Image: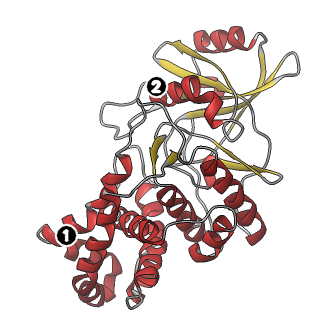
């Protein structure tokens, strides 16, 4: 599978005042800045080499055109690094500091070495999932700060209900299958009720809960030996670990890696899951992509819908398997 990369601003366009503030915060001038790619938002991300031989990573936001659909979340992410450092270590990179200048906001972080996890292999997925289970186990049932959301996962309990209720929503989703739209429409009308009932479990998923990263996918992680290092923390919240791992493993399958069920087995070798909450999570995540994938591309995020169509295919196929309903074979006609 070929993976595109998003546009990223080069170091040459970073304002001088920002560069000077970065050098001051790092106690050394930057002698080399290499763009780091990943995700589908246009944030400025660089691997820095310093005059004293040190290294760091910078992630920055900057002023955007008025018509851009990009919504920066770096303020929230900085709060997580500042206030949860002792909880998210050693999975998260060390937080060094931040810079605000000329409309730019930059986070300075530990540079975590290691290549991209893509392409996924069984060996890499096994190490990632077992380390991910250790991350969740470290906070499972523990007291966590009250400022963290306890309800974010519940937002995924309503998408199939909305699709079933809204006029033409099933038709719009089925249209993704092109010449197999009629087959898709029949499958969705037959099974949308089952999916809707399954997703409702997320409204009342019982404790114990854990700290959730809520956005774990290949461009937000690196592997260092058997340790998973996780980046991009603006959506951190408290909720069922089943939701976090369901989202991660379906993304692995969507990117050509091992199946979601196979990857889940590696996670459960370290931390068992509750079947009903897992099924509700799988259905809810599939509902989210079913809601998003048919939409037009938002300004400034041209690759977003392509990524979401791939994840629709992985997550809805998995939902059908765990709910023991007929395979949605029409998904093979949905373009990636």
Disc 2 designates what residue? 75
Can residue 119 be seen from the camera position used here? no
Can residue 104 be seen from the camera position used here? yes
**Residue 209, percent across and down?**
48, 49
Indicate left or right for 170 with 46 as reference. Answer: left
Picture disc at residue 235: none
**Residue 174, percent across and down?**
28, 78
Indicate left or right for 231 with 47 as reference. Answer: left
Which of the 4 image quadrants contains residue 266? bottom right
Rendered view: 214 above or below 62:
below
**Residue 152, percent across and down?**
36, 46
Q: Earlier in the sequence, mark 2 or mark 1?
A: 2
Quadrant of the drawing holding the N terminus: bottom right
Which of the 4 image quadrants contains residue 279? bottom left
Which of the two residues, 185 or 45, is positioned nearer the viewer here? 185
Disc 1 designates what residue? 169
Comparing labels 2 and 1, the label whose residue is closer to the camera: 2
Q: What element does badge 2 sit on?
A: helix
The answer for how far apart the CA atoms under marks 2 and 1 are is: 35 Å
Rendered view: 125 above or below 14:
below
Which of the two residues, 53 or 226, is positioned nearer the viewer here? 226
**Residue 327, percent across and down?**
42, 89
10 Å neighbourhood of mark 1: few (<14), some, or many (≥20)? some
């Amino acid at each position: 599978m070929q993976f595109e990369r998003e546009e990223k601003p080069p170091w040459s366009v970073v304002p001088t005042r920002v560069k000077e503030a970065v050098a001051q915060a790092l106690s050394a001038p930057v002698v080399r800045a290499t763009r780091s790619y990943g995700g589908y938002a246009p944030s400025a991300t660089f691997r820095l080499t310093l005059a004293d031989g040190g290294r760091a990573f910078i992630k920055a936001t900057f002023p955007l055109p008025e018509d851009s659909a990009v919504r920066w979340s770096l303020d929230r992410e900085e709060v997580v690094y500042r206030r949860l450092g002792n909880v998210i270590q050693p999975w998260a990179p060390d937080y060094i500091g931040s810079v605000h200048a000329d409309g730019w906001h930059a986070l300075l972080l530990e540079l975590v070495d290691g290549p991209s996890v893509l392409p996924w292999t069984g060996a890499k997925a096994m190490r990632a999932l077992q380390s991910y289970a250790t991350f969740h186990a470290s906070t499972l049932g523990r007291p966590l700060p009250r400022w963290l959301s306890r309800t974010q996962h519940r937002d995924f309990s309503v998408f199939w209900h909305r699709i079933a209720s809204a006029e033409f929503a099933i038709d719009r989703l089925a249209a993704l299958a092109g010449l197999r739209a009629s087959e898709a429409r029949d499958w969705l009308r037959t099974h949308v009720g089952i999916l809707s009932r399954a997703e409702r479990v997320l409204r009342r998923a019982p404790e114990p809960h854990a700290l959730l990263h809520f956005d774990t996918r290949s461009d937000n992680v690196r592997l260092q030996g058997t340790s998973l290092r996780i980046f991009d923390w603006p959506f951190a919240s408290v909720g069922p670990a089943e939701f976090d791992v369901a989202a991660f493993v379906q993304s692995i399958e969507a990117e050509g890696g091992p199946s979601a069920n196979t990857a889940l087995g590696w996670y459960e070798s370290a931390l068992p899951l509750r079947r009903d909450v897992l099924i509700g999570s799988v259905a809810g995540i599939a509902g989210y992509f079913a809601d998003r994938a048919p939409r037009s591309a938002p300004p400034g995020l041209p690759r977003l819908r392509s990524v979401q169509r791939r994840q629709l295919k992985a997550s809805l196929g998995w939902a059908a398997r765990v709910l023991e309903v007929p395979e949605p074979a029409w998904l093979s006609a949905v373009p990636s």
